[in-house]
Each structure stands twice: as structure tokens, then as C-alpha cells.
Amino acid sequence: AGPSQPHPGAMAARLVLRGAGRALRAARALPAVPGPCPGRGCGEVAALRLTGFSQEQARRLLALQPRLDPERREAAAAQLLLLGLSAEAALALLERSPALLRLPTERVRERAEELRRLGLDGGR
């Protein structure tokens, strides 16, 4: 890809991100994940499961900032996954730096894009 064309990986990341947003919105309409789940947060667990987190990882993520807007949490997690981090690595990063969850969604997206430009995708 030359300077006039966007990098194929960046184009793919944008497409995946758009699709991830749709999947996260659709997940709210899904039935609760099988197994014990408190009344609050079942839809959030299901949405996080769709992005690649296990049920236990989703619950750990929800426990980080319990009062946080679910869309903000899901957007931050999705950006880390789009960088190529595994669900466990993304969760570990958010556990070490929970303030990332409170950043506005657009700010998280900008920071992730900057990391991609610097070649920090693929978990490297």
C-alpha cells in the first residue's frame, strides 16, 4: 500500500470495528449466557462473550468499573482486541489501568489508531 492508499490492516480494523459495534448492540437483545448470572449485567456478559472474552473474563471486566456505561467498557475492550491483544492480555491491561475504561470512546479509538500507526498491532 502506497502513501495515497490506506494500509489494508487499517481498513480491515475499521471494518471490524464497525461490525463489532453492531454485534455489541445486537448482543443486548440476546438471552442471558447459560449459567448463574445476577439480574444486572447478563446482557453485558453476553456482549463481551461475543467479542472473545470467556464468561469469567467478562465478569472480571464488569467488576472493574461496575457503574460504567456498558458501551464505553465494550468499546475500550474492542479496541484492545483490534490491536491484536488476546482477551486475557486486554483484561490484564484494563485491570492494571482501569482509567482506560473511563476515557471517552473516541479518545480510546484515537489512541488505538496511533498505536497501529506506530506498528503496535498484533500484540507486539
Image (tube, grey):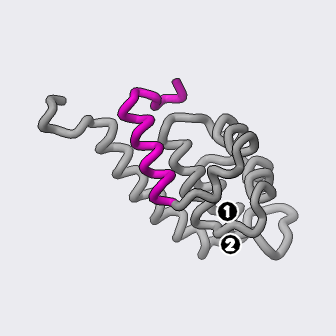
Magenta run includes residue 121: yes
Q: Which residues are magenta?
A: 105-124
Residue in view at x 54 percent, y 57 percent = 75
Tell me which amino acid carries mark 1. Answer: Ala
Residue 114 at x, y = what percent? 40, 39
Q: Are marks 2 and 1 in contact (CB under 8 Å)?
A: yes
Residue 114 is left or right of residue 35, and the answer is left
Residue 74 at x, y = what percent? 59, 58
Q: Residues within 10 Å of mark 1 (few under 14, many from 20)?
A: many
Residue in view at x 33 percent, y 36 percent = 9
Residue 70 is left or right of residue 117, and the answer is right
SS type, badge 1: helix
In the picture, the quarter occupied by the N terminus is top left
Residue on which the image places disc 2:
31
Residue 103 is left or right of residue 67, and the answer is left
Residue on which the image places disc 1:
46
- For the residue pair 81 and 119, the one nearer the viewer reads as 119
